[in-house]
Image (tube, coloured by chain):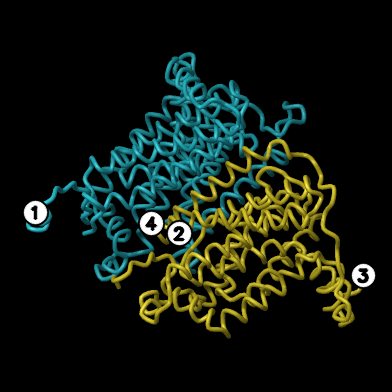
Chain colours: A cyan, B yellow
Amino acid sequence: MKRFGPFVFERRLAPTRTAILGYSLLAIAAALVVMSFIFWAYGVSPVKAYSTIGRTTLGTRFGLMEILRRTIPLLLCGVGLVIAFRAKFWNIGAEGQLLAGAVAATWVALFSGIPAPWKIPAMFVLGFVAGAVWGIIPALLKVKLQVNDVISTLMMNYIMAYFVKWLIYGPWRGPTMRGFAYTDLFPRDAWLPLIRYSKVHWPTLVIGIAAAVLAALILSRTRLGYEIRVVGDSPDAAHYAGISFLGVSLWVMLLSGGLAGLAGVGEVAGIHHRLLEPDHVSLGYGYTAIIVAWLARGSPMAAIITSLLFGLIFAAGDEIKVTLQMPFQITGVFNGLILFFLIGVEVLLYWRVRLVRKGQEWAGKAGS
Amino acid sequence: MGWESWIVDTLKRALAYGTPLLWGTLGEIYAERAGVVNLGVEGMMILGALSAFAVAQSTGNPWLGILAAAVVGGFAALIHAFFSVTLRANQYVSGLALTIFGLGLSGLLGTSWVGISLKNPLPKATIPGLERIPILGEALFRGHSYLTYIGIVLAVVLWFILYKTRWGIAIRSVGESPSTADAMGINVFAVQYLCVIFGGVLAGGAGGVLSVEYRPAWTEGMTAGMGWIVIALTIFAAWDPLQALGGVVLFGALYHLAYRLQAWFPPEFLKLMPYAFAILVLAVAGLRKVKRGAPASLGVPYVRGQR
């Protein structure tokens, strides 16, 4: 217990839901305040910036659909990362796993010869498998050779990005694309259906929401979920309980990588309809999903909300680029700030603040 | 080409490519020796690269550029120190936030500097005397940037401080067991702050090496994952400054050898080599059972009065 003037700070073990929500909102608000200084320093009135963003993203059907389309990859990657982070597996590799899924989908669409009605399901299945394989490698490296998971997953992002570049500049370069570094356009039967007048490929969105629900069930209701939580909360306890660290790591990265792979399928089959430069396939969704997952605090269902928030930030970034002529990197600045403030307020979560008047000094202590 | 000049050439290129990695790795070693992981190296490097280039270009003095990079890197690290030491936040997440923030901010502020080549890059230098050592002298002490020599000297000096002085003992004991260090009268927070900031100074400087020396220009995202390779090298070097020197040369040599294979492999494969090497060296370290040397309290925030 600590005292500052009339305020008493008491430790608490488990933060309440209201506290988590309140402090998360506080963090976002703080990031918005710092952001307005950055707008101001850049010579853009913060009021104008925020009102423009609000009007163009939340105020129009087009804007809302743009948010939704950005939400899809963030949700799929985010749910996957929630699972991985629950087991304290630091998967920073969703970006590469997403690209692996995109590569698999491209293969199905252009080179597999799978007949039309099976094409789209095959894209999702193989996209999941490709992402999962790309995720399992770091899991094996971590358990068998103690290779740091942050490093290996991150390095595999770069490796996959250059692999995609090689494909589109080399063997998969489309003969009909007049020398541009794209593959050919996918045949129509490999395009995902869209919500009318938008770029929202709804099948992927449905899969994303289903994934969130399933992940929540797995984490709370199954033996695997229990093992994931024990490994994450207390590796020692997991060891004594005979939980296989290898098994949990493999499962976690299979799911996490696979879901990111599905996000990649959605991007190429739903929006671009071909494989192209890796930073056009994904605008860093795999990295932003880390913040989506961290903000969701281990709850896959909460990732639905947090991915919407970051979908909004991506849509806003587009708008800022077009109307305010500021670089898209502004989203990176904002994302970094949010993450800083989030971990900053985390400290507050474990303290309860009470106001005490004179003569009531010991009331709290008697109660606790 | 004879084998001698082949070795000389490889070592030379390895060291040139490895200089920013060396600076960064030495800094990260100090931060981690004091028990604080900083995954923000990539972000500090890119901020350093931009500030170095901007200052060097506007003042015409590349040394001022390096200085600016070091200062900016130090301030960036201060943010990380505040979150991870004072607020005891998750160090991984704080470092990631720093990287995301740094990449974003440098992209935002760097737009007007893109596509200009630096008017006054750093000159090359030769160390008189030492350059006459056969093979090694030619490879290590002739025609390198001053920054490379500074890096080598730093590696030796930092090794000496870490293992042979009281300061070194203080830093290492904070990383191993902060409560014991605290009981011995060492100011744990001060040591952690200083080491993290020092790490940032070197990481920022490493970015400067990149933008005023190695590739004297500013391009967005020009660090291209070097900050992460630094973290891999820190582990590979077993948190030892001298081994870092060796690790960097080995890494640079592998990278250079990959370039020799250009005739047989597409360029994309050469470009992904450093990242594959980073995983490879850690896997090799794992095979050699290198858990040796990892500071025991690495990544664990210190709370006074708790064990």
Q: What element carries label 3?
A: loop
Q: Which chain carries label 4?
A: B
SS category of the residue bearing label 1: helix
Whole-number angstrom distance, CA of label 1 to CA of label 4: 28 Å
**Please, what is the three-letter code of the amino acid marked with disc 4?**
Leu
- Numbered circle sitting on residue A139: 2
Viewed as shown, does residue B246 lie left or right of A51?
Answer: right
Q: Which of marks 3 and 4 is nearer the N terminus?
A: 3
Q: Do labels 3 and 2 share a chain?
A: no
* x and y percentages locating residue A297 in the rendered image: 33, 46
Q: Name the residue: 79% across, 66% down.
A: B146
Q: Nearer the viewer, mark 4 or mark 2?
A: 4
Residue A71 position by quadrant: top left
> How far is the residue under mark 3 from the one under mark 4?
58 Å
Report x, y in % for residue A345.
Answer: 35, 47
Q: What residue type is labelled 3?
A: Met
Residue beneath label 3, please? B1
Relative placement, left or right, of B183 versus B71 is left
User: How many callouts does the rendering have?
Assistant: 4
**Residues at marks 3 and 4 on the same chain:** yes
Contact (Cβ within 8 Å) of mark 1 with mark 4: no
Location of mark 1 (residue): A363
Mark 3 nearby-residue class (10 Å; few <14, some 14–19, many ≥20): few
Numbered circle sitting on residue B87: 4
Q: Measured along the vertical axis of the image, is residue B192 above or below residue A60?
A: below
Whether pointer 1 and pointer 2 mark residues with C-beta atoms closer than 8 Å, the reply is no
